[in-house]
Image (cartoon, rainbow, N blue to C red):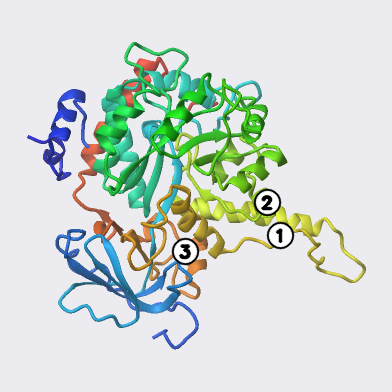
Amino acid sequence: MCKLCDEGIPQSHSGSRRDFLKATAATGVAAASLNLFAARPAAAAVGDPPADSGRPGRRYVIRGGSVMSLDPNVGDFPQADVLVEGKKILKVGPNLSAGSADVIDASGRIVMPGFIDTHHHQFETALRSFLADGLLLPGTPGGDINYYQYILLTFAPVYRPQDVYINELFGGLSQLDDGVTTVHDISQIHHSPAHSDAAIQALMDTGRRAAFGYFEGAGLTHGPDYKYPEDAFRIKKQWFSSSDQLVTMIMGGEIYLTGYERAWQIGRQLGLQVAAHILSPFGMRPTFDALAQGQGGDSGTLGIGSDNLFVHMTGMSDAAWQKVKDLGAQVSLAVPIEMNMRHGMPPVLKMESLNIEPSLSSDVEVTLLADFFYQMRATMNVQRALVNQMILDTGFASGNWWPAQPPGVPNPLTTRDVLRYATVNGAKGLRLDRKTGSLTPGKEADIIILDATAINVAPLNQVPGAVVSLMDRTNVETVIVAGKVRKWKGKLLDVDLPHLRQQLEASRDYIFAAAGIPQDLFRSN
């Protein structure tokens, strides 16, 4: 008997899955003539999804949509098709011959690659909005109820494996519904191997592409079952022995924690990326400077490498930034959170000055939503606000209504820029660019179909602009991961959301009670 199958989430049953469920008691989870992407009549939400999508040999064609490939070599099409076989994209172009393949009518829709979130703390799903007014650390107005003391030191330590599972599953499904087809889950909840296994199982059961970030278990003290970072060897062998699977692994090693060098060493020994939060607070700048000089860690010999993924990168020195660029380390920005929780000003302009680009991430839903349309807009808006003010600050010459752009001031970001950050750059940031991030023949079919006939978008005049400046999750009509249709007609498939929501609420109730925090729907900070 499979708990998830009973609850409306069909599963592939393997021995390891049965063992996991026994061990953790996890709970379930005609416009082509015009030089624009023109709107067409709505018809994509007709009929059933293609049968057995994603399985070897099964073909279907996404027909007649405005295709934005995010691959310069493929290009964009006002009206074109995407042919999928199994889990891969076969062809992209107008009027493709598809034989007897099933058809997804994408008339009036935008077809593009799914979004990629390179940093999300999914274990906190049950705590959504708890810290809407809070800051990262205490000590100033707005910091009485803060992330460090409440989320990491009070709530996180009381999580059971089953809490980890339902939080991860529900949070993942929510982003899948939003068109985020890939996530790097940084959940600092690894209090025991059972907690880690619950997180991994939930990522797999969600049915989207993911990188499991193996970080510490948050809290000042740990029980006898605490195995971080050494359990990485078992986890890699047990769960990630194949190089061709939907869920992969990244090693976490926070530089503000004692003994972080060991986590970095293990990650590199296992051939994994090594990720860390790097930001102004927690006294990180001197530590990061040492790493940039190859003098980090307890040994004084640890250094930054091309295998690193750094999150935030606020407040770091010019020398450290130059080393990040020179070595090709990846940088993930969570712009709304960085502005809201006092991480420091998002280093968008700094990265532009070095001619490097970030990926985007949602960070924590305890404070802000994990919607990727929002991430793109916020990134574009803050950069343009800074650039525009730099230009206006030069002053107005007599009779000049509009100051010239001074040398050295970057151009304003465009909608295409932030779309690239949210897709192609995300794939690069997670070492997945050979598999996903663009609609490129040969890559796996991680595709979203967006309704451009909806009242908040019509009439369609420019595709990148419509996606970034107008859309939200209600426009995400179809979501495909590795060829498999996961959302259809605006609804997730094979998921009993009311049941899962009940389980998430029960987990929420337990977590608050165990942490000794009263539930108050109208409390102030």
SS for dot 3: helix
Marks 2 and 3 in Cβ contact (< 8 Å): no
**Residue in the foreground of this view, choosing between 463 and 475:** 463
Q: Residues within 10 Å of mark 3 (few under 14, many from 20)?
A: many
* Quarter the N terminus occupies: top left
Which residue has dot 3 on it? 467
Q: Residues within 10 Å of mark 1 (few under 14, many from 20)?
A: some
| Rendered location of residue 118, percent (x, y) | 46, 45
**Residue in the foreground of this view, choosing between 4 and 444:** 444
Q: Residues within 10 Å of mark 2 (few under 14, many from 20)?
A: some
Seen as rendered, the residue at the extreme bottom is 33
Which residue has dot 2 on it? 349
What amino acid is found at the position of numbered circle 3 in the picture? Val
Marks 1 and 2 in Cβ contact (< 8 Å): yes
Disc 2 or 3, which lies upstream in sequence? 2
Query: How much space separates mark 3 and mark 1, taking CA atoms?
Result: 23 Å
Q: Quadrant of residue 172?
A: top left
Marks 3 and 1 in Cβ contact (< 8 Å): no
Which residue has dot 1 on it? 410
**Residue in the foreground of this view, choosing between 424 and 523:** 424
What amino acid is found at the position of numbered circle 2 in the picture? Leu
What amino acid is found at the position of numbered circle 1 in the picture? Pro
